[in-house]
Amino acid sequence: SVLLSALSICPSTLRMTLVEPGPVGTAFERKVYEDAEKMDLAGVDEETARIFREIYLPYSRKVFNSLAQTPEEIAEQTLQLITAKEPPFRHQTNRVYMPMTALKHADPTGRLPLDTFYKLLFKHDSLFTASLGLLRMLQKRAGKSSK
């Protein structure tokens, strides 16, 4: 916005940081998946219902489980930003999610991230699954936070 742009170039004692978390693992997110699994798809054609249940839900859950941070991890990073002497203007809390953010920013139409996920799911399934395993390992190794 214009206000944020103006504030970022004006010298001031006011410091602000746009905190940008990626996926956040919460009870709400788990409930969304539980409800989606029980959803009545009687009014949907068979192929769409099959793709939703057998492909979209399992892969969406895998992606979320591989990339999600806890609210506590995000709060810890936010506290570090609040107490920082020179906080950045923008801060992504999840380094592993940054490539997805880059795809979203690279294409304002939103097609690039959708097309990328489509190709990974339907044309490069084994690469996608292996990548998610690698991401889970990196998150565990980094203590599931990216400071």
Image: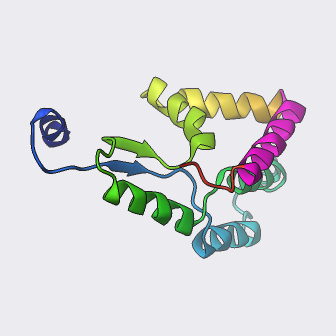
Q: Residue furthest right?
A: 126
Comparing 25 with 61, the one in front is 25
- Say above or below: 121 vs 48: above
Is 65 contained in the magenta span?
no
- Say above or below: 10 vs 119: below
Where residue 56 appears, as percent x and y from the top left, is 75, 49
In the image: residue 112, left or right of residue 33: left
In the image: residue 59, left or right of residue 144: right
Is 134 contained in the magenta span?
yes
- Say above or below: 131 vs 55: above
Q: Residue furthest front?
A: 85
Q: Quadrant of the N terminus?
A: top left
Q: Main secondary structure of the magenta part?
A: helix
Comparing 8 with 11, the one in front is 11
| Residue 81 in view of the camera | yes
Residue at point 14%, 32% (across, down): 9
Residue at point 68%, 54% (across, down): 64
Magenta-colored span:
124-141
| Residue 107 in view of the camera | no
